[in-house]
């Protein structure tokens, strides 16, 4: 019998690999609702009805593992997956339809995996396969609450750990968010249990960090203890990105100043970018906004998204205008901070308001459930790949400060210049319907090298020490020299 059996990739198709990011500032994050991505094992399907919005759709860790190349080929360096822990076995009807815990935010038992998503062995295999492709994995973790009527509430041993009904408070920390049982994270016994349950799993599967849910609803001493213990067990690189609702460069500082986490989602980016592209507000104001994002505390990061599971997606806000959506993505990928791509938006998943913003991953002609047959915009995906590749090749785009070069009329021109790598890139975006001109002094970092437009993939001539280019209507240029 052969001693070695190849159990993965079929012959002739080695797994796609990305160059791993060296620092989190350079990461490109891809967020997946596991239940809505790919169904890799129909044997674990329960409460599955792909036609209903609030039921499980059958996606699982096995399916995500089978289609990791989809994400690797795009160029993402990290994946954030919704929580795989055991969810309550029922539904709520407050929204007017049966709504289940397919999203992973209604835990029944943090120490168990939900069989509908898969086993811990499957989670570990997913992490191992992601690592083999150069991709890191962040687990979504909820400390603030349990699912409705979860075992933590009904078990007499733990029922005192939670605020429910009349014991719910009135402030951010003690209120019962959406009526969910609120953990008394201020009690050492509760904090210890919650931290340990997640940390044990993260260690067993080799996760690279967490996306932290509902951060402002849990007390600061908890987050400080949490930071200490995650670092003790997982090392100092274990990455923590928090959801502080409404967070931006300034309002995240109470969590960054005590170093409770590395990064936070930037809730200001979507509205600012889409508003400017739609012609609302002056270019100079948008330019100032981009500059203001640098106020984030040193060593900490913003993560900018265009769509998420909690807000209306960018393509829907833009009423399906893919030209403007492409420009929004280009601004996301040429701006400081960690871009988070919400699964499927890169192929034009239409999104919409909740719960339509949690639809199935579109797989087009590929026979992958639950999103087989949903149209895919491959041209848009190809543009995403190019934007990500340009960003990864030019550290100035992820690390450098923002310097305004022009902000007149409908055209924004800015320079990103990174001292450490001597990399400099000029970005010009035209939101208007007429061609415009962008002209600027050649950055010293370019020396005598041939200037290129990486986005148009063409050489750009210079005249004296200046460059002058035309920026087409609703179009952009990304200029620099090859590295
Ligand atoms: Ca399944
Ligand atoms: Ca709370």
Image (spheres, rainbow, N blue to C red):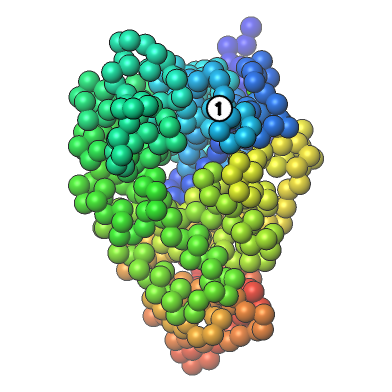
- Find residue 188 and report its image quarter: top left
Q: Residue at x 30, y 64 (%)?
A: 295
Q: Is residue 450 above or below residue 20?
A: below
Residue drawn at (46%, 83%) of the image: 406
Q: Please identify the residue farthest to the bottom as the structure is shown.
A: 464
> Is the distance from the Cβ of mark 1 to the nearest ligand 2 atom less than 8 Å?
no
Q: Is residue 167 visible?
A: yes
SS category of the residue bearing label 1:
loop
Say if residue 228 shows up in the picture. no
Image position of 87 with respect to 172: above or below: above
Residue 443, percent across and down?
Answer: 42, 80
Q: Please, which residue is most extreme toward the top here?
A: 1
- Does 100 sit left or right of 187 as displayed? right
Closer-to-camera residue (184/76): 184
- The quadrant where residue 365 appears: top right
Q: On the rendering, which quadrant does ligand 1 occupy?
A: top right
Within 10 angstroms of label 1, few (less than 14), some, or many (20 or more) residues? few
User: Which residue is drawn at the image coordinates 64% and 43% (left, top)?
Assistant: 356
**Viewer-proximal residue, 312 or 296?**
312
Label 1 sits on residue: 92
- Residue 357 picture location, percent across and down: 61, 45
Q: Nearer the viewer, residue 76 or 145?
A: 145
- Closest to the observer, 411 or 55: 55
């Amino acid at each position: 019998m052969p001693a070695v059996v190849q159990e993965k990739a079929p012959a002739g198709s080695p797994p796609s690999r990305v160059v791993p990011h060296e620092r989190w500032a350079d990461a490109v994050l891809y967020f997946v609702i596991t239940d809505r991505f790919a169904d890799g094992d129909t044997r674990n399907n329960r409460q599955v009805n792909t036609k209903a919005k609030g039921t499980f759709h059958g996606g699982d860790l096995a399916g995500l593992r089978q289609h990791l190349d989809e994400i690797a080929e795009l160029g993402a360096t990290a994946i954030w997956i919704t929580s795989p822990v055991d969810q309550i076995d029922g539904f709520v009807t407050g929204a007017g339809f049966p709504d289940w815990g397919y999203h992973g935010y209604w835990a029944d038992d943090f120490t168990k995996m939900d069989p509908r998503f898969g086993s811990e062995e499957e989670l570990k295999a997913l992490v191992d396969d992601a690592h083999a492709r150069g991709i890191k994995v962040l687990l979504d973790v909820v400390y603030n609450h349990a699912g409705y009527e979860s075992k933590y509430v009904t078990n007499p041993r733990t029922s005192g750990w939670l605020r429910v009904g009349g014991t719910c408070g009135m402030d951010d920390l003690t209120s019962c968010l959406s009526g969910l049982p609120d953990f008394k994270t201020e009690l050492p016994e509760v904090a210890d249990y919650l931290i340990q349950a997640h940390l044990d799993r993260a260690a067993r599967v080799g996760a690279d960090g967490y996306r932290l849910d509902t951060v402002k609803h849990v007390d600061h001493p908890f987050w400080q203890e949490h930071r200490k213990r995650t670092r003790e067990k997982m090392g100092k690189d274990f990455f923590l990105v928090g959801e502080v609702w409404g967070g931006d460069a300034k309002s995240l500082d109470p969590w960054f100043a005590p170093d409770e986490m590395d990064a936070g989602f930037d809730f200001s980016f979507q509205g600012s970018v889409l508003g400017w592209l739609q012609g609302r507000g002056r270019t100079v104001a948008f330019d100032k906004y981009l500059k203001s994002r640098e106020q984030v505390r040193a060593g900490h990061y913003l993560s900018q998204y265009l769509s998420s599971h909690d807000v209306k997606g960018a393509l829907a806000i833009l009423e399906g205008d893919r030209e403007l959506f492409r420009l929004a993505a280009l601004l996301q990928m040429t701006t400081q901070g960690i871009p988070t791509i919400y699964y499927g938006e890169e192929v034009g998943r239409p999104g919409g308001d909740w719960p339509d913003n949690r639809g199935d991953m579109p797989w087009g002609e590929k026979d992958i459930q639950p999103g087989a047959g949903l149209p895919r915009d491959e041209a848009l995906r190809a543009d995403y790949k190019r934007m990500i590749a340009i960003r990864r090749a030019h550290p100035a785009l992820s690390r450098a400060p923002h310097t305004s070069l022009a902000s007149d009329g409908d055209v924004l021109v800015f320079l990103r210049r990174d001292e450490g790598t001597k990399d400099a890139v000029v970005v010009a975006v035209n939101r208007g319907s007429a061609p415009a001109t962008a002209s600027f002094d050649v950055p010293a970092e370019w020396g005598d090298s041939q200037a290129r437009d990486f986005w148009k993939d063409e050489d750009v001539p210079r005249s004296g020490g200046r460059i002058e280019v035309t920026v087409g209507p609703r179009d952009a240029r990304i200029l620099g020299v090859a590295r």
